[in-house]
């Protein structure tokens, strides 16, 4: 009986052992199965996301373009784009819309828009907010005696001087919070920009320069360059200008601008001397950095938008018709 | 001896069994470990790709915009954008550059660009190729007697008629290979487009209409709409026009256009009657589909680019200076 009892206990122990072993192995199997399933699921998700990405990469130019900047995005210097804008120009919102479409394609910029107005208008406030760009909205009114009348030549008085200075002042006042590796570019709202321009500008060490089309009463003006230095200028007028260059033809390193508090534009200088006035504070010609393949590529056109014909408004009155203000506010 | 031998074999079997069991369990453990590791790795990759995506989503407007269309991309009707372009206009390449910047943001379009020329110029060929857009490049020259001279009003002769017809002909000739759910839009290269316009256009069933700014010598013209029908027109001239609407103010379903082989533009119709001439072949006013929030939103501006002043070229000659042809070709 003793032996049989021992045998019984032994059997129980062996049985128990095998039972535990079976449970243990089953659990192990289940864990393995689970882990493999999780892996397969995640793998499928990863593949889906990859194909999502690849497809997009193929189908959308802006995406494949933006992807180029992704890896080094945090290191990219910010481009501060200073744009004076004027609501006396009927095409203001059209011009800004076109410029916004272009700026949407440029990574890491801050658009500093300065209205020629005593206050920030609701129209531009709405426009900027809806743009989802990084922006700074400012306003500074041109005094009455400096406003260009419709019977005066567009170049008879300086344009955008106070507004651009307001933008410069904002950068100085906020110098502690902004990207000191950044770059400043004065970009009018009716110019035409090839997006490659902005990547030429981005790594400006002091002041960079490049050709501009449709300025100086020519198809283009440009710095003439040799071995990475500016050795002369292709232009048809204004030999007295130390820097015969358009506003859209240069960019300034932010640190350099901040180091020269007196550098700004002025309403007191002669016609065509704004650029020279500012740059003379900052640099000499032989220090300029030629961009755009030694100043041989056109990446910016100084286009102007034609004035709007409104002869029809007299006929509207005769027909007793009126604009709808809600729609007019969007023009 | 027999029993001890049996005991020995039994021990071997038990030992062997435990050895196999140990190997089996170890393998199972290793598989589990491996599966878990693979899962963790894939999970990390997935998370990285997600954060990559999320970051991009936050930092680039075009990407977040394009993502909206991804899921239904294959189902999106193609918008065929017909653009006549003219190399007698000095700002041609600037205008096209600005339009390209805008079109880069619009998913699933085909840009049909028709040069006013006997051949496809190298300049535009290069421009289109570099744009990486889906495009069709055509050319059709305006006969000498229909070319607008610099001393003639821009509206004194019809513009772009033969070029737009060439675009329409291409669609008819290739009707088997194109998207019959597609839509046709006649978009001039110097207009200003809010990208929302294209998504308004995309699902045109027959002919859709919307307001256009800076046309008809007014700040805007528009169809007046009630309950989704056009009930009148806001305009200051041309009551005789059945469709008092600008070229940029309507889009046509491709199937409808293909069903009417005689529908095209004509050099023989009166000033301002091109749009009415084409649309009269296709539809009646009460069938028009109002877009842009019952024709109360401005998504397109009929801007014009100002002519370029080239007075400086005389001075260039006196200074014995010449344009660089390599650079001039890029302007």
Image (spheres, coloured by chain):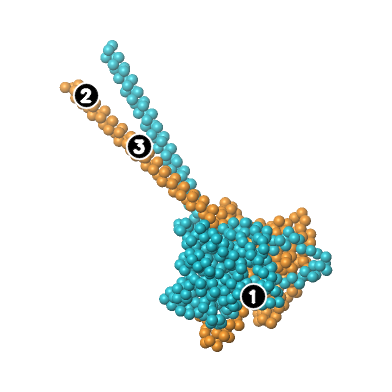
Chain colours: A orange, B cyan
The reply to whether dot 2 and dot 3 touch (C-beta < 8 Å) is no
In this view, the residue farthest toward the front is B262
Q: Is B89 on the left or on the right of B177, as rendered?
A: right
| Label 2 in the same subunit as label 1 | no
Q: Quadrant of residue B22?
A: top left
Of residues B240 and A287, the one drawn nearer to the viewer in this rendering? B240
Q: Is A17 on the left or on the right of B230, as rendered?
A: left
**Residue at 52% across, 54% down:** A56
Callout 2 environment at 10 Å: few (<14), some (14 to 19), or many (20+)? Answer: few
In the picture, the disc for residue A7 is 2
Q: Position of residue B319 (x, y in %)?
A: 82, 67
**Residue at 67% across, 69% down:** B143
Q: Nearer the viewer, mark 2 or mark 1?
A: 1
**Residue at 60% across, 75% down:** B268
**Location of mark 1 (residue):** B157
In the picture, the disc for residue A192 is none
Of residues B63 and B210, the one drawn nearer to the viewer in this rendering? B210
Element under disc 2 = helix
Q: Nearer the viewer, mark 1 or mark 3?
A: 1
- For residue A44, say whether it is visible: yes
State which chain disc 3 sits on: A
Give whichever of discs 2 and 3 has the lower sequence position: 2
- For residue A174, say whether it is visible: no
User: Which quadrant of the figure contains the N terminus of chain A?
Assistant: top left
| Label 2 in the same subunit as label 3 | yes
Distance from Cα at disc 2 to Cα at disc 3: 31 Å
**Location of mark 3 (residue):** A28
Whether residue A2 is situated above or below residue B308 in the rendered picture: above
The reply to whether dot 1 and dot 3 touch (C-beta < 8 Å) is no
Distance from Cα at disc 1 to Cα at disc 3: 85 Å
Element under disc 1 = loop
């Amino acid at each position: 009986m003793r032996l049989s009892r021992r045998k019984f206990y032994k059997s129980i122990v062996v049985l128990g052992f095998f039972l535990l072993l079976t449970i243990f192995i089953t659990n192990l199997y289940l864990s393995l199965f689970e882990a493999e399933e999780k892996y397969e699921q995640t793998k499928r998700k990863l593949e889906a996301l990859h194909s999502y990405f690849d497809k997009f990469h193929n189908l959308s130019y802006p995406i494949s373009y933006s992807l180029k900047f992704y890896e080094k995005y945090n290191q990219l210097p910010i481009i501060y784009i200073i744009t004076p804008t004027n609501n006396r120009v009927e095409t203001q919102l059209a011009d800004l819309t076109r410029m916004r479409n272009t700026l949407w394609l440029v990574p890491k910029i801050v658009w500093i828009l300065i209205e020629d107005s005593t206050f920030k208008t609701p129209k531009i406030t709405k426009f900027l907010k809806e743009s989802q760009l990084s922006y700074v909205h400012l306003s500074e009114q041109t005094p009455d005696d400096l406003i260009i009348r419709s019977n005066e030549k567009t170049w008879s008085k300086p344009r955008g001087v106070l507004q651009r200075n307001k933008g410069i002042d904002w950068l100085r006042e906020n110098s502690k919070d902004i990207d000191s590796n950044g770059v400043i570019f004065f970009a009018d709202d009716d110019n035409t920009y090839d997006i490659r321009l902005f990547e030429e500008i981005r790594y400006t060490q002091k002041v960079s320069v490049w050709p501009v089309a449709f300025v100086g009463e020519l198809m283009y003006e440009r710095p003439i360059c040799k071995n990475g230095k500016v050795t002369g200028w292709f232009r048809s007028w204004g030999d007295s200008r130390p820097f015969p260059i358009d506003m859209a033809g240069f960019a300034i390193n932010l640190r350099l601008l901040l180091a020269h508090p007196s550098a700004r534009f002025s309403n007191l200088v002669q016609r065509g001397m704004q650029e020279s006035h500012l740059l003379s504070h900052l640099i000499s010609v032989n220090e300029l950095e030629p961009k755009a393949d030694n100043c041989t590529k056109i990446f910016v056109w100084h286009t102007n938008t034609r004035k709007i014909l409104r002869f029809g408004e007299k006929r509207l009155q005769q027909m007793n018709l009126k604009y709808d203000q809600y729609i007019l506010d969007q023009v």
